[in-house]
Image (tube, rainbow, N blue to C red):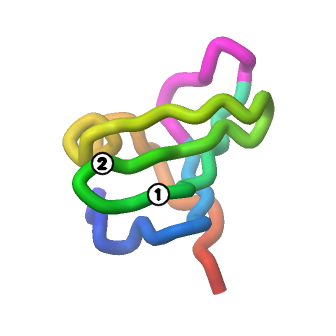
Amino acid sequence: MDLTQLTLNTVIETKKPHPCGGLRWKIVRTGADFKIRCLTCGRVVMLTPDELRKRVRRVVEEES
């Protein structure tokens, strides 16, 4: 996964579901770490670029 295409407000799908059952997340902060928000329950998680690269299955929709 190329992290350069992951910009603010991009929606991604993870390989494993969140405990709430959601697979879709929205990127709310980029930089040294990535902050993502679950679109099902609203939980916010901070991940390092390596952790995010391992968890992302695909990009669902990009910011236009």
For this orientation, the residue located farthest to the right is 40
Q: Is residue 31 left or right of residue 16?
A: left
Q: Amino acid at mark 2?
A: Asp
Mark 2–mark 1 Cα distance, whole angstroms, equals: 8 Å
Where disc 1 sits, the SS reads strand
Disc sitting over residue 40 in the figure: none
**Can you say whether 58 is above or below 6 in the image?**
above
**Can you say whether 12 is above or below 4 in the image?**
above
- Counting from the top left corner in percent of width and height, residue 41 is at 78, 29
- Counting from the top left corner in percent of width and height, residue 60 is at 62, 60
For this orientation, the residue located farthest to the bottom is 64
Magenta stretch holds residue 2: no
**Can you say whether 17 is above or below 6 in the image?**
above
Q: Nearer the viewer, residue 19 or 45?
A: 45
**Quadrant for the C terminus in the image:** bottom right
Image: magenta residue range = 14-21
Write the residue at 62% across / 45% down.
25
Residue density around tag 1, few if under 14, some if 14–19, many if 20 or more, within 10 Å: some
Q: Amino acid at mark 1?
A: Arg
Q: Which residue is mark 2?
A: 33
Taken as a whole, is the magenta stretch helix, strand or loop?
loop
Q: Is residue 49 left or right of residue 21?
A: left
**Residue contact at pointers 2 and 1, CB within 8 angstroms:** yes
- Residue 48: which quarter of the image? top left
Count the marks. Answer: 2
Write the residue at 59% across / 73% down.
62
For this orientation, the residue located farthest to the top is 19
- Residue 54: which quarter of the image? top left
- Counting from the top left corner in percent of width and height, residue 38 is at 66, 37
Q: Which residue is mark 1?
A: 29
Q: Is residue 53 left or right of residue 11?
A: left
**Quadrant for the N terminus in the image:** bottom left
